[in-house]
Image (spheres, rainbow, N blue to C red):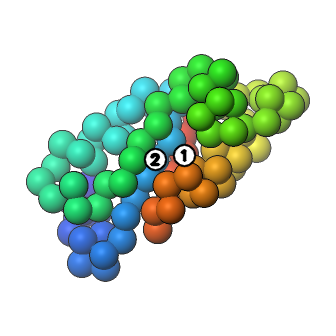
């Protein structure tokens, strides 16, 4: 993870994350390292379906049809995160 911070800093890139089942573990891991403030933009912990719908604007029909831990939900999470965060790199984790 230290090498990630180093590369992102060198390339002047920002990273944002949207997490579900990990409960903020990825964001915590990144921000626990020296230099993270230069590269970490924001993180959402959207553990509940309601949080995914309200904060990340995941359509409830996607969750209903495919489930909250589906590939489709994860893609919508990261797609909408990229619109919110404006970071260069966006990561979503669910299930």
74 or 85, which lies in front?
Answer: 85
Residue 43 picture quarter: top left
The residue at the point 54 percent across, 29 percent down is: 46
Where, quadrant-wise, is the C terminus in this rendering?
top right
Number of numbered discs on residues: 2
| Placement of 50 over or under 88, stated as above or below | above
58 or 73, which lies in front?
Answer: 58
Residue that extends furthest to the left in the rendered view of this protein: 34
Location of residue 67 in the rendering, given as x and y in whole percent from the top left corner: 76, 28
| Placement of 46 over or under 6, stated as above or below | above
Label 2 packing within 10 angstroms: few (<14), some (14-19), many (20+): many
The residue at the point 18 percent across, 43 percent down is: 32
Mark 2–mark 1 distance (CA, rounded to whole Å): 6 Å
Return the mark for residue 92: 1
The residue at the point 37 percent across, 64 percent down is: 14
Give the residue at mark 2.
17
Question: In the rendered structure, are the residues bearing label 2 and label 1 in contact, judged by CB atoms less than 8 Å apart?
Answer: yes
SS at mark 1 in the image: strand
Location of residue 82 in the rendering, given as x and y in whole percent from the top left corner: 57, 57
């Amino acid at each position: 993870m230290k090498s990630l911070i180093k590369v992102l800093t060198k390339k002047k890139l920002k990273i944002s994350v949207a997490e579900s089942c990990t409960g903020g573990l990825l964001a915590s891991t990144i921000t626990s390292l020296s230099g993270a403030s230069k590269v970490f933009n924001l993180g959402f912990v959207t553990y509940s379906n309601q949080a995914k719908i309200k904060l990340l604007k995941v359509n409830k029909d996607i969750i209903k049809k495919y489930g909250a831990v589906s590939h489709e939900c994860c893609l919508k999470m990261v797609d909408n995160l990229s619109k919110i965060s404006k970071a260069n790199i966006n990561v979503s984790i669910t299930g």
